[in-house]
Each structure stands twice: as C-alpha cells, then as structure tokens.
Image: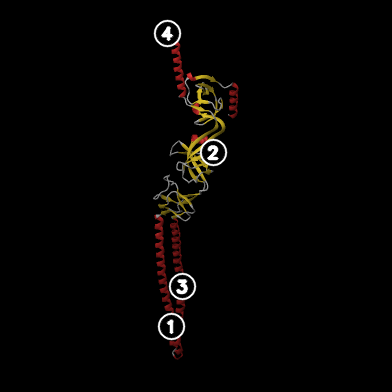
C-alpha cells in the first residue's frame, strides 16, 4: 500500500465512524425541557350517585314476590305505579277475614231472628194474660150474686193472673236486656272483623307502590343477590326497592385500593370523564375517606376503601348509576420543570440526565423532588429549553460529565432535614 493512500483511507474510516455515531444519535428519542405544571394524576373508577334520594321501601309486615317493576332509569311522575308485590300470606289472611266477617253477620242475623221470635212469643203471653185478666174483671161484676166459695175462687184467679202478669213483665224486660247484650256482643265481633278487613285492605293497597315525587326511578340493590332487584325477587319489610334521586346535587363514590387510598387527600381536585357520554366532563373534589376498608370478597385480605367526591360542575346533566373515570390530582406544582421519569437515570448513587449538545450528550447530575408514576420535578441541574435523552446513550456519545456544586447539595440536604 502506498503511503499516499493511507490518509485517504483514514479519512474514509473517520467519515464512516462519524456517520455511525450520527445514526446512533438519531435513534435516541429526546424531550425538550419546558416550564410547565406538574400534576400527579391518579385514575380510579367511580359511580355517580345522588346526594339526596327518595327510597321506596317494601311495606311493613310484608314478605312477598315482585310481580311488576318499572324499568331501570325511567322518568316517573308523582303517583305513577313503580312496583307491584304479591304476598300470598296477606291475601290468605284477607280472604279468611272476609269469610269470618260474613259468618259473623249471618250469625248476628240468626240471633236477631231467634230473639225476635222469643220476644214475640213472650209478648203474646202477656197479651193473653191481659185478656184473661180483663175477662176475669168483667165476670167479677156478677160475683155479688154468687156464693162465697165462688167469689173466693174468682179472687184467687185474679191474684194469679196479676202475679203471672208481673212475672211476664219482668221476663219481657230481662229478654230485652239479654237481646241487647247478645246483639251488642256480635256487633262488636263484626266491628273487629271489619277493622281487620280494612287494615288488611290498606296493607294490600300498599303492595302497589307509587312514586312519591317526580324523577328518574332506579332499581335498588337487593341485599341478598348484590344486584339490582328484578321481577320475581323475594322482598320483605324495609327492603329498598326503588330509588328516586334528587338530580339537583350529585356525588361520585370511588372504591380505591389501599395504596391509592393512602395517596389521596381531602380537597384533592377531581376531573370526571364518562365512556357513556364522551362529550361530557365534570369537576369536583374529594370530600370523605372511609376510615375502614372492606374485603373485595368474603375472607379476602385485600381491601378496598370507599372515597366520596363532590360534583361541583358538569357540562351536561349526570344520571345516577353512571360509571365514570376519576382523575384525582394528588399533587400539583405550578410553573416548574417537570420531565418524564424515564429520562432520569441512577449513576453512582446520584440522579443524572443526558443533555443533548449537538450530536453528543452531557451527563449531568440533577436533584429531583416529588414524582408521579410518569414524571418528576427537577429541583436543580436543568434549564428551560434544554433537550434531554429518554434513553441512555452509548458511552461513545457522552463527551462531558457535570456535577452539582457542593453548596447546592448542602442546601438541598438541609432543606430535606427540615421537611422531615
């Protein structure tokens, strides 16, 4: 090989090498550092509920089956029928009460007829005695012409008739009292049956449940199945069947894992989005956090925690039962440097980023603050408009290393101790 050709070959090799370096550089994605707001957003599924609702319950002293139930989510007006319950025990009790009432009325009519007959017979005896006495009095006018014995017999007959009349009069008065007492007793029995029938009729009327106000009727959750009540489900005293929410004020109930629950604080702002209403959006804040978790299923050690959030404004009216994706702003920092978490690397127990300098990179130490699952706040080490690598570049592309000054590190460490 001629000496004159060596410089040319070397130049070619350098060009090839620089081209490879340039191509490797072009393969590394970068991120431009800008002044922005840091938002640590936590996404949790939730359900829209009304703050105030009217519950329509299964009537008292009822144990029956739902034979009719209005469709879920139908708008109803006051007085509309929303549910019909069938209670076979109540129906049998009502039929039995009707039969007892009819028998009591028939018995009373029979007793009245029998007592009236006795009264009439007794009155006939009284009238017969009066007639006998009257005849005896007429015959007594002729007694002065009769013998002493005959007169004595007539006098005894008149005394006997008088005594018989007294006896019949007392018996007649007693019979009236007995009649009134017997009739009163049966009338009171009939009244009891009447009251029972009216009470049972009211209970049967209550098995037809009507809306107490206007609104969207939603089926309640059955205590046994854990699902919304359907026709054919058994229901009993005090079980909610229909819920009519007050649409003026809504809330969102979230079931968070223990890890998410610990990160969320009261008054954190929340943004809601809805798969069923893509054009709708709503906003609110965290109001309550349940102090005790509930197992996700029986005998499970994994728990979920109920969190309640307000709905302060919405683009469109929300309906109860609507599923929503809740973006909870756990932490917010305004006007700061926030970069992707994948752009921060661990190097010799320090955090570094790779700042692009033309076709090469500078490895620079940074201090980071609060972080989310995707991004982190850079406290020191970066400036606006710089460009950083999202992947660690090859060592051949790293031409410079820059560390933070001791004064900045000491200030950072002292601040950390104060916060702790």
Q: Which residue is mark 3?
A: 176
Residue 2 is tagged as 4
Q: Which residue is mark 2?
A: 269
Q: Secondary structure at mark 3?
A: helix
Q: Residue at x 53, y 19 (%)?
A: 400
Q: Secondary structure at mark 2?
A: strand
Colour scheme of this structure image?
A: secondary structure
**Spatial CA span between label 1 and label 2:** 108 Å
Q: Are marks 1 and 3 in contact (CB under 8 Å)?
A: no
Front residue of 347/208: it is 347
Going from N to C along the chain, the mark reached first, 4 or 2, is: 4
Q: Secondary structure at mark 1?
A: helix
Going from N to C along the chain, the mark reached first, 2 or 3, is: 3
Q: Is residue 176 visible?
A: yes
Q: What x and y, as percent, mark residue 79?
A: 47, 56
Q: Which residue is mark 1?
A: 131
Q: Are marks 2 and 3 in contact (CB under 8 Å)?
A: no
């Amino acid at each position: 090989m001629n000496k004159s050709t060596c410089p040319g070959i070397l130049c070619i090799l350098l060009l090839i090498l620089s081209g490879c370096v340039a191509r490797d550089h072009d393969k590394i994605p970068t991120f431009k550092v800008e002044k922005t707001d840091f938002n640590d957003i936590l996404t949790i599924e939730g359900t829209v509920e009304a703050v105030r609702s009217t519950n329509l319950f299964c009537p008292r002293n009822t144990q029956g089956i739902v034979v009719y139930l209005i469709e879920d989510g139908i708008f109803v007006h006051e007085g509309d029928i929303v549910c019909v319950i069938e209670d076979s025990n109540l129906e049998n009790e009502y039929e039995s009460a009707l039969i007892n009432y009819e028998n009591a009325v028939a018995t009373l009519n029979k007793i009245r007829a029998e007592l009236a007959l006795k009264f009439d017979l007794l009155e006939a005896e009284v009238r017969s005695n009066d007639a006998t006495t009257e005849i005896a009095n007429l015959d007594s006018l002729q007694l002065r012409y009769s013998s002493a014995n005959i007169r004595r017999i007539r006098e005894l007959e008149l005394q006997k008739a008088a005594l018989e009349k007294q006896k019949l009069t007392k018996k007649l008065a007693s019979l009236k009292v007995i009649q009134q007492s017997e009739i009163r007793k049966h009338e009171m029995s009939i009244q009891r049956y009447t009251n029972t029938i009216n009470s049972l009729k009211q209970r049967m009327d209550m098995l037809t449940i009507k809306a107490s106000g206007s609104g969207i009727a939603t089926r309640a959750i059955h205590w046994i199945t854990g699902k919304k009540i359907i026709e054919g489900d058994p229901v009993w005293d005090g079980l909610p069947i229909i819920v009519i929410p007050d649409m003026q004020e809504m809330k969102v109930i979230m079931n968070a894992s223990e890890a998410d629950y610990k990160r969320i604080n009261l008054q954190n702002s929340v943004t809601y989005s809805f798969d069923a209403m893509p054009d709708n959006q709503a906003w609110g804040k965290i109001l309550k956090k349940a102090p005790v978790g509930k197992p996700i299923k029986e005998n499970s050690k994994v728990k979920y925690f109920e969190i309640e959030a307000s709905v302060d404004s919405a683009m469109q009216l929300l309906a109860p039962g609507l599923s929503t994706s809740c973006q909870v702003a756990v932490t917010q920092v305004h006007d700061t440097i926030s970069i992707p978490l994948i752009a921060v690397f661990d190097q010799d127990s320090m955090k570094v980023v790779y700042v692009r300098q033309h076709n090469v990179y500078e490895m620079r130490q940074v201090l980071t603050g609060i972080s989310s699952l995707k991004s982190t706040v850079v406290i020191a080490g970066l400036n606006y408009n710089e460009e950083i690598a999202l992947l660690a570049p090859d060592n051949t592309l790293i031409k410079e290393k820059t560390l933070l000054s001791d004064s900045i590190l000491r200030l950072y460490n002292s601040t950390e101790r104060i916060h702790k």
